[in-house]
Amino acid sequence: MTINPTYTDAPSALGTVEYEDASASTIVKISYSAAERKALSDRFGGGGTHPRVIVVKALKSLFEDLSSITAIEIDYIFKKSPSQPFEKDDLSSFDEDEAEQHVTISTTMEKG
Amino acid sequence: MSSKELKIIDLNLFSGSGEPFRTAVGGYYDILSASDGEVLISTPYYNRRGDGELGEPPYVYPFIAAVKDSMIKIDEDVKKTIDDEVLIPNYRFPIRLEGNSEYVRDSNHWKTILLGGTFGHIDYDAIYSDSVFDNHSFDYSLPYSQKEYNSMPEETEIVSDAIQITYEYNYYHDKYQKYIDELDSELLIPNLYLLKMYQIYADEMESWQAGYAAALESSPSLASAILNQMPDITIDKDIENFVTLEGTYTKENGYLPGNLLDEVNVLKHKLRLDHVDEKDLLLSQYLTSSIILNPLSASTISNIKNKFQNIIFDDDVTGEDVYQAASDEKDIFPFYIKFNFTAQENSSIASYIEDNDYDSKFMKLLKETFNEDLEDLTPEDTEFVTETTFISASSDRTTYSEHINAENSEYRTVDFLDMLLYSKNNIFSETDDCYFMGNLDEKRLAALDDIGYYRYVNSIGNLKAITKVINSLDTDFDIESLADLYNLRTNTNETLAYRIEKIGGIPSGDSKTQNVLQNFWFFNSDDFMQGSEFYDSQVKYGKDYTYNVYAYVLSTGVKYSFSDLRLTRVIGTVDDDGEIEKYCLEFYNPETDEAIESLYTNEGQLNSEHATDAQLVSAVKWDDSVDSRYKADFYLNCEPSLKLLEIPVFSKTLKVMDHIPNQVNISPYQYMDMSQKLGFTVNYEIFNEYLNYPSTISSNDDTIKNDYLNANDIIEDEGYIDNVSVSRQRYFEVYRLDKKPTSIGDFDKNLIKTIDLRDPVTLENFSTAQADDKIITNKKYYYLFRTLNEQGMPGHLSEIYESQLINDGGYLYSIFNIIFESDLEEDIFVNPARAFKKIFELKPNLSQMAFKYDDVDFDSIALTQLENLVVGSSDDTIWNKQFKVRLTSKKTGKKIDLNFTYKLLTE
């Protein structure tokens, strides 16, 4: 099941959240009251009432904070990848390195 | 030959290397001595006649009759994978060696020939070795330097590929120059690309925000659509602080405050940038005194100095508009270093990297590898022989000659697959001393990720690139015979990246050498250096910087070894009427002497119920003298090998310098009083574009001249100085000598006056000045004048003014003569006499030499008759008369007169 949120600007005293069951998805309809719209506008500016704006701005803010990584406190350390690391043997059938060579060449020729 | 052509040859391809089998059967290089020098010569592999049959002698080594490996072409079963677990193609196939029975004495001799040792008091070097060898030889080309390019004969177009590192000096801005001079690191100097990038990104983001805000008010559906078009722009916080001077110059604050606007407009007009909007001149703010008022914070300075040690340009950035836009407005900067060359075209491996968004991670890994940041992945110095073919012009630029030089060269190399493997196993960023030019997009963030946020991005890009590379090896690796291995072919190669290393700053260490300040790393994308240039604005005026350009070239070569050697020994014969028809042979392991089966398909099996797989009958003699009783089987094991080499492309040390001030016009005069003063009105002339670099006075001038000509790729006395001095004239220098100079250098240490042209009130610089001088009368003085500009660059010289004040009984008058520099040259008679070739001899006719006895009385005493003896029987004698002989050259028409007199001497 996938959730496809849709939004409406229909005025309402309290704001509403509606769910519609479609055949393969649930549609969530969200509308805001005037008070909610004002609060959002005060909080985020630009008259933005779109929930996605809120999310995007919040993510963007987080993203920018992450870019200055030194300020981040790490809450969670990811586990190491369960996949096996490659070994050098996986990329060559030879056990030895190339034999060392000792040849010294110095030639010079001028034509024309 | 438009480029310098390089042949980079693996050492084991040379005769005398540790790979002896090449020397035995051909497929190696050697040195050929010729009348005009020495040159490398290849000895080809001789085996094949093209029909898969036995090869024809002669082999280089007389004991070898043939090498057979043809069956792999017709029978895939003999090609066996060495190790199924290994990801890259790896296989082996058998090779049979046929000994030449004309020279091989017996089975022991055959063994000695293969493995080395002593036989019959003769020492033999082994021709078989089970060591591992590789061959990464390839052909490459390098550009000529711009100076070499400029020195080529004018009529020919033999050179087209050139690299130039020079500078542009656009305008003089003393405040900017003073500010950056005081910075303790070049890395803190404003960066041309960053300023423009920030401006464009900020514009783009602000423009979107404005559009979105407007749409929200009017149409939510339109706003929703605009939201999906939000620019994906994130700028590194340190960069933002650096560019905006800790937020002082953000758009929100109005980055063109009133007190700067006028200055910007003046600048625009001066640079003929009237068409550019003031808003686009964010850069210009950095070029004003305001930058000094807004110093960076300690943390920004520290972070920038760390990050800017390595600036990485990955695949995307050089193709982006911001890169081009920065280039278009580069001239807003007072000066910068400019790089111009054509990058090599990349190929498949580069596309695997960029198509899988692995370029950022790869470039960071490349930087870490060749900066030797990583303990487990360090480049090694690998020796090759590099043969370079290039042309050089004669000093008069009328002819040119081709040179072929070969010598050992060491390149830093790393196994490319090891790099990819390291990248796969180490997805966390290990260093942070780098900055990716451009927006902090996902792949750049992933490359810098040291906590695992982007582990998937890093892993997937890396794995896809590895898979693509391995798949290409499966397709392209095509060693199927010894001939394929030994044919001295050039391996495929492609240039994946470039690095410009910048060395400069205050010398340090025991050897007082300058250090690496910065590296610019460039992924060799389709857009990089294809008609574009790169600029480095982070330089100080007049400081030496050495730039080393490196190419990172991937050679797709081969790694191989021989193994499982087995030899034949004669265990019986097949006779026919007492004559040996065939030999019964048995293969054996030379290390254990135990019988062992052959590897190669045998021509004839031994027809006996007791025969083993190791035994066979030799082929029928295939000519009168040679049979095939001596055989050796072994495997050729091979796999592809990818090596990344750091190839030095070009190196140049240069500094940013102003150009040469113009000539001066001199008007001499005399004070009409008894002050004994002469004077000169010195006028700063307009620019003359048809002048060479002026003659130098002091050794410091020589240094400046050499630096200038070198930085601008000008050949001495051949190129006009076609750049006008950027800074204004500041000083007139007056030199004086009291004896006639023989060269301009004689004026050194005879500077009598320096006139400052700066008006202390208006701060404008005059272009005219008077130079007065009190002198002794009736004595000649020699004056020379020149200009120094604001940067102290010496200008073109005036003529020399021979000046004297004549005191004629109290009446003073002046005489001024102009002496040109060419007049100073005096003939120096090193050889006042020259030996004359014996071409002719002037000898009197016999009639002039014969005695005339008419008046001689032979009866008298001889002494008394001496006066009566006349020399010359001719009526018109030549004695004591003058003659002239004139020689006229048929070639030049020049004449030589020889005046001579015949004198009669008495002995």
Image: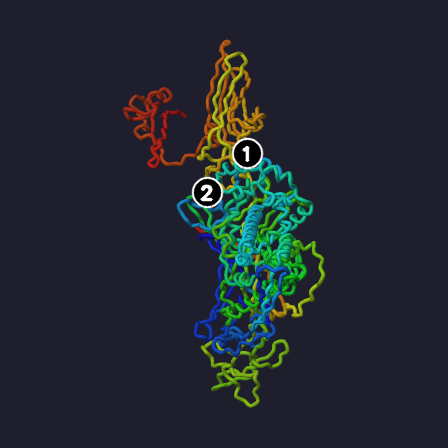
Q: Which mark is residue B395?
A: 2
Front-lying residue, B707 or B498? B498
Kindly identify the amino acid type of the residue bearing the numbered disc 2. Answer: Ser
The colour style of the image is rainbow
Front-lying residue, B797 or B359? B359
| Residue B378 screen position, x and y as percent | 64, 59
The lab-note entry on whether marks 2 and 1 share a chain reads yes
Looking at the image, the residue that sits furthest to the bottom is B609
Is residue B341 something one can see in this rendering?
Answer: yes
Pair 2/1: label in front: 1
What crowding class fits label 2: few (fewer than 14 Cα within 10 Å), some (14-19), or many (20 or more)? Answer: few
The correct choice, above or below, for B112 with respect to B347 in the image is below
Q: Which residue is mark 1?
A: B793
Looking at the image, the residue that sits furthest to the top is B809
Front-lying residue, B198 or B594? B198
Circle 1 chain: B
Identify the residue at image location x=55%, y=34%: B793
Quadrant of the rendered structure where residue B441 is? bottom right
In whole angstroms, how far apart are the C-alphas of marks 2 and 1?
28 Å
